[in-house]
Image (tube, rainbow, N blue to C red):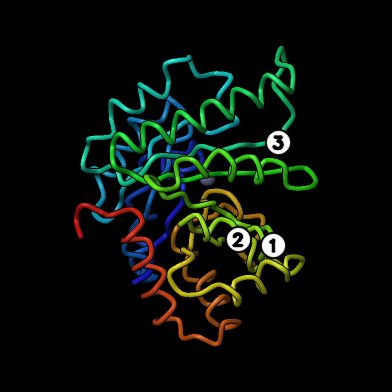
Amino acid sequence: MLTDSHCHLASHRFPADEVGALVGRARDAGVRRIVTLATGLGDLDANLAVAAAHEGVHACLGIHPCDVHKAPDDAPEQVAARLANPLVCGVGETGLDYFHPAPEGWETGHFRARQREFLDAHFAIAEAAGLNLVIHTRDREGDLSLQEAIEIYRPHADKVRAVFHCFVNNFKNAARILDLGGLVSFGGVATFKNAADVLELTTRLPEGSFMLETDAPYLAPHPHRGQRNEPAFTKVIAQRIAEVRDDSLDSLAEHTSRTASLFFRFRDN
Ligand SMILES: [Zn+2]
């Protein structure tokens, strides 16, 4: 059994009447559990609705760092108010995005400061709800967003675990996250021909330290690169990583799904 630990089934790129077929194709590919993540106040309930409508689909709720300028100050409380729902398996997608420029009318420093405040607030609501956290970081160059997210994580690390999703950084930084009790997850980028370093990193991390994800509809794996991604492609990513780790697909599927179950504590376990 495979688990897609990160995708966005409420995305406008997945028409609502198509989601049943997507989940069906995923199941046919062996992907039995799917985590769909909200990105803003506008899609919290849509993600809960998708999880309610499809067996094996669970939701994470949060405000994406690229959405913090649209969210009111009490947005984290509005997220918190929904976390007792048994379909919710985590808090996110939150984090720091220093890749995209600040939106119009926002100064870069203020935009980033609000992202950091929201990330810290997401840790607080996750802790209060007994849930773990899904973090996005992205930089245009260097790794400032990753370093700052790790520092925001540190004081919460004894209460909340965090996964740094779509991890494309180096072993040293992965090790800093694992030292705090956190995880990373790997998606389509690990299959890209120009990302051999990410693929190599997957061979250096032990079982239990990483999960698989698609980030669908984004970042489709090779040979689907550039197309709309979907949860069924978790299998393509798993096959490539199993190959380089000299592991079997079954074994990789089993331990990455177990890691996801421990992290998200799915309430249908
Ligand atoms: Zn995402």
Q: Type of residue at label 3?
A: Tyr
Q: Residue 229: tell me if it is visible.
A: yes
Q: Residue 18: tell me if it is visible.
A: no
Mark 3–mark 2 Cα distance, whole angstroms, equals: 19 Å
Task: Give the image quarter of residue 203.
Answer: bottom right
Q: Is residue 29 above or below residue 242?
A: above
Residue under the point 31% across and 61% down? 261
> Closer to the N terminus: mark 3 or mark 1?
3
Instruction: Tell me residue 107's x, y (percent).
Output: 74, 17
Instruction: Tell me residue 116's x, y (percent).
Output: 58, 29
* Mark 1 lies on residue: 170
Q: Does the residue labelled 1 lie within 8 Å of ligand 1?
A: no
> Closer to the N terminus: mark 3 or mark 2?
3
Q: Type of residue at label 1?
A: Asn
Residue 50 circle label: none
Q: Neighbour class for label 3 at 10 Å: few (<14), some, many (≥20)? A: many
* Mark 3 lies on residue: 98
Q: Type of residue at label 2?
A: Ala
Q: Are marks 1 and 2 in contact (CB under 8 Å)?
A: yes
Residue under the point 26% across and 54% down? 266
Viewer-nearest of discs 3 and 2: 2
Viewer-nearest of discs 3 and 1: 1
Task: Give the image quarter of residue 150.
Answer: top right
Q: What element carries label 2?
A: helix
Q: In this view, does 64 lie above or below 32?
A: above
Instruction: Tell me residue 45's x, y (percent).
Output: 32, 30
Mark 1–mark 2 Cα distance, whole angstroms, equals: 6 Å
Q: Is mark 3 on a helix, strand or loop?
A: strand
* Mark 2 lies on residue: 174
Residue under the point 39% across and 40% down? 91
